[in-house]
Image (tube, rainbow, N blue to C red):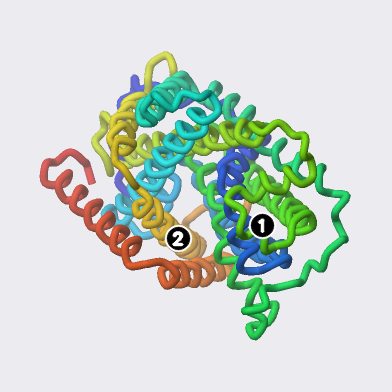
Amino acid sequence: MAEAPTDAKQPSLRRSIGTTQLALYALGSMIGSGIYGLIGKAAGEAGSAVWLSFLVALVAALLTSLSYASLGSRYPRAGGAAYVTDRAFRRPSLSFTIGLALVASGLTSIATQSKIFAAILADMAGIEALPPAAIAAGFLLILSGIVFRGIRESMWVNVVCTLMEVSGLLLVIASGMSYWGTVSYFETPPDRADFGLPLIVLQASVLTFFAFIGFEDAVNVAEECRDPARTIPRGLVIATLAAAVLYVAVSVTAVSVLPWQELAAAPSPLTAVMQRTLPDMPAGLMSFIALFSVANTALVNYVTASRLIYGMSGQGLLPGFMGRVHQTRRTPHIAIWLLFALLLLLIMVGDIADLAAATVLLLLVVFISVNASLIVLKRRQGEAPGQFEIPLILPIAGIVVCAGLLVTRMASTDWRAPAVAGALLAAILGFYLVLRMMKLTVR
């Protein structure tokens, strides 16, 4: 497989990430701000049995998470999914599409979180007179500075934010634990009773699965991990299981404190739970914690997107200058500031909800390709095994689950998200052809 030519004087990324930091990195990306809103929607579908939906979603998420862990131990490269897809199928156009689909997903997530951060901060600080776009731009500038400064600094900010996020969920659990056992945990919505508990839980797990998305980000900092062949599998498994324990405990607490009907109707479900268990709680506490949650999600996606661009440049899929590493900071500075420019454009756009929904669909396509890549590579003679190997049946099951989620997700949304996803794929392929014609890539 052809690789891009490298400059012997080009500095490399700094290896400083251990297992604990990587686990917190992946955990922070997963728990993010999603659980705070998802639990209400999931309770509306599964009733007080929502905790079972999180357990089913854990099994579904673990299948692909284990595939990422195995591939990360085999090929610890910054390109992540783009690299392994390229190695498995040897089709640059496919690898380019997978890589940029992930970058697009990261960009929309960062832009969305920037807008949410601006709205929360404006409300808390009473600075509504300042345009939200200006606050979001300032947030992005600070975020870019942290990511540029270095992976150590980014990881320490991530650790602080993740601990704040986890503390918020632990506070919810601790404040409501005395309510455990006071309700039936198998009650489902009456209008769905004909479906039966197993089917209701399974349908709700389609929604709760998305609370686990984020584990895939860990593989993209592989070239900055110490002993990545061991660090990546351990970090991914620890993070996924830790997220599951938190989700199940929070969901049991939530339906114990509030009837699932109230939980489903609440605009901010966990805030409603805290208002019941701790009525004297400062009004802005959950909003303060949410600031850290939103900032962390944006930070992790920013680091991930910049490393994807760096990795794809090293593969010859993007122009070489995009993968340059800063001589002293040891970060891919060109990629970071290119992303900053694109993000400034995105936050000026009024509504990117359809783009965000479309990139969720593309993430499932990426998960299918990653599982398929592992199958191909495990069956190919001459491919050295990694330190963390899994049975072939697991990536096969991962493909089945992700394909089922993709079909269900497309059926449950309107036509706009699939249409935007298709248009985005066409634009990515068009961009690839332009780069090839202009000879800006080596593949």
- Residue in the image at 54% along x and 34% along y: 296
Q: In this view, does 138 lie above or below 353?
A: above
Q: Pointer 1: residues within 10 angstroms few (<14), some, or many (20+)?
A: many
* Residue carrying label 2: 364
Residues 232 and 194: in front is: 194
Q: Would residue 173 appear left or right of 322 to someone viewing this image? A: right
Q: Residue furthest top?
A: 328
Spot occupied by residue 438 in the image (x, y as percentages of width and height): 11, 41
Residues 399 and 224: in front is: 399
Q: Is residue 41 above or below residue 130?
A: below
In which quadrant of the rendered view does residue 129 lie? top left
Q: Pointer 2: residues within 10 angstroms few (<14), some, or many (20+)?
A: many
Residues 121 and 151: in front is: 121
Q: Which amino acid does label 1 sit on?
A: Leu
Q: Is residue 397 visible?
A: yes
Spot occupied by residue 226 in the image (x, y as percentages of width and height): 59, 31
In which quadrant of the rendered view does residue 40 lie? bottom right
Q: Earlier in the sequence, mark 2 or mark 1?
A: 1
- Residue in the image at 33% along x and 36% along y: 347
Spot occupied by residue 366 in the image (x, y as percentages of width and height): 42, 57
Give the numbered dot on residue 369.
Answer: none
Q: Would residue 66 appear left or right of 404 to someone viewing this image? A: right
Element at label 2: helix
Residues 87 and 344: in front is: 344
* Residue carrying label 1: 263
